[in-house]
Image: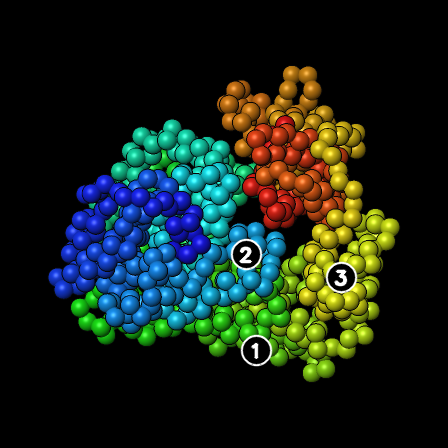
Amino acid sequence: MTGNGRSEQGIAIRDHQAGHHDGSAELLDELRDYLPDDRVEAAREAYAYASECHEGQLRKSGDPYIVHPVSVARLVAGLNMDVHTVQAALLHDVLEDCGISARELSQRFGAEVTSLVEGATKIEHLPSAGVALGARKSAEDAETLRKMLVAMAEDVRVVIVKIADRLHNMQTIQYLDPERQREIARETMDIYAPLASRLGIWQMKWQLEDLAFRVLEPEHYRRVASTLASRRAERERFVRRVERGLREALEEAGIEAEVIGRVKHLYSIHEKMQRYAAEGKSFDQIHDLLAVRVIVNSVAECYHALGVVHQTWHPIPNSFDDYIGNPKESMYQSLHTSVLGPGARPFEVQIRTREMHEVAEYGVAAHWAYKEHASARDRQYEERMAWLRHLIEWQQEASGTEDFLDSVKTDVFRDQVFVFTPRGDVRVLPAGSTPIDFAYRIHTDLGHHCTGARVNGRLVALGTKLQNGDVIEIVRGRRDGGPSRDWLNPELGYLGSSHARQKVRQWFRRQRRGENVAKGRELLERERKRMGIAEVPDDLHREFHYESFEDMLAAIGYGDVSLQALGQKLADQLPETPPVTTRAPSVRRGPPNVRVLGSAGLHVTLARCCGPLPGDDIIGYITRSRGVTVHRRDCHNTRSGAEPQRFVECDWGREGELYAAAVEVHAWDRVGLLRDISTLVAAERVNMVAVRTEHEDRMTTIHLTLETEGRAQVSRLMSRLDSVRGVVSVTRSEG
């Protein structure tokens, strides 16, 4: 293992005790469960050779080094991978760390195993997380990521070995110093877990996420784990009740099925808690915290079982997804639905066949699982991996490192939507895509001349976010037209895919240089005035690695330098704001715009405990002396149940007033953090009327009081704050 192998785990050279348990016996037993004897023997020979090569080497944990490749091989065997992949897992460090030549390895184990080991060796240390996904991009980082993707395109088994390699390192990460733990965990969260997800290897994906989550956000990890632990007995009773009820209903319908209840994994729950908190919802409202899998014998029985589920429990609207009719590109297929179970408690049901379940657990690894008949390597696998070949092609068109890394982040590591052409052909786009993205996916020329779109027969704005099942028809403009520069402004939301952004940038890059320079100068001047900077430094172009100021202006003009990046560089010219507490007058300038239904004329105030905003679901409480106090409906004070007759229904009145919103930003402390947050808040045209900071260890919590129009504006700002370098979480706070 290069980069993060022996050197990261602190190998020393000394004799280890004879007979130390290294897991090899368990590995061979696991292989005998699915491989014939001759292939188990081939794996044993690879183990013996690796053990000889690593003799005397120790990991930082004190274990003999051979424990690591054996553990990686056991993870690979857990996917029922072919013997060559198991051998490569056992031997993946011998070229780099033991002085063994590829020729010698090939003579002993053959060309295929050697090719896999060489592939794993070539993928050197991946770029650190901040670098890989948008902070400090460099040509070297892009080249490393290209190697990873090219290796996947040539033989995906190389990357499966690397993912297993990283998983075992995460399982033993406690032996590294804290700073190195955070670096590896961040890289795991940003690169390895998304790759495992994209390849459909869910059992490794969730382990990587949970292990990285524990290192990166220990407080949040403990909080989620504690919340789940406190309700374990109640949850287990509920799951058993649901399993029993569903088995009985399926048996009555004549469907033979395996029913398995489970709880979502910690990091997945944490993400949902963050998202629900931003929407003013509670933990108890997460409808897919609990999931029940139903495994049946045929596709027809999947849909029959779905009907049984919906007859047994009430389905939750807009929660059904058909991934059998529209499979994910990772080959995942299932029916998903959420229902209200016993006690009106929500849970998710996933219905699939046994074959679909195997693919859901193992992803593309299922294609390489050992089978008696080699013909099982089918055309479906080649079609499913087409996305990777497309990405390799697109990278040739990318204008630079930023474009390529953006395409990986956006088009590979993000969820997808499935939409249709008017002829019924399916097109797969990154989640958040718009009609313009769809047009560019059909043909570059159609994208350039897109002036309008119909979604499901209705004219829509070009920035409309597409949903699964939409039918898209593009309105083509005049031949002498072209894309708008506004499409490149991320704040306007016209484009959701990096593929479309690259095509638009290429179009503007081909326009006359003078026009691009003039437009760039105009945009730079506008940004300077907005930020209140006296003058732009003459050497600003060096910050963007351009040879001249004019080259930088041209790049701004055709969109290679985004306004967000420009704003961040200009923000560096602002004086550092010390972390202090500031106070400002009360934000709202009059009575709140709330209607108390059936009780006109009462004095109305907004509760300080939960800070309701327009867009929040609210309820009023008639006090003894201060009229009606308005709370968010999920406020802990409204859930206490005291004197329910004093609660009254309320709704929001006219728009136009401003309200105070309390937001907490938790982040790793660094120079410039508060400045970056202040700059972003200003860019959103939101007034920050109070700031308070708290420091603990290397973490900082920034309490912001914002002057806002309502929940929608706050949610949009929180989403952008979450992308600031070093920010761990952004939440609305109570009081």
The residue shown at (50%, 62%) is 144
N-terminal of the pair, mark 1 or mark 2, is 2
- Label 2 crowding class (10 Å Cα cut-off): few <14, some 14-19, many 20+? many
Can residue 166 be seen here? The reply is no
In the rendered image, which quarter contains the C terminus?
Answer: top right
Residue 541 — which label? 3
Q: Which residue is mark 2?
A: 132
Up-down: is 178 above or below 161?
Answer: above
In the rendered view, does 653 fall on the left or right side of 528? left
Residue 690 found in image quarter: top right
- Does residue 12 show up? yes
- Residue 556 appears left or right of 28: right
Work out which residue is located at the far right of the displayed protein and give it. 534
Closer to the observer: label 1 or label 2?
2
Residue 555, above or below 337: below
Q: Residue at x 54, y 33 (%)?
A: 634
- Where residue 425 sits in the image (x, y, percent)? 46, 74
Look at label 1 and name its amino acid: His
For badge 2, the amino acid type reads Ala
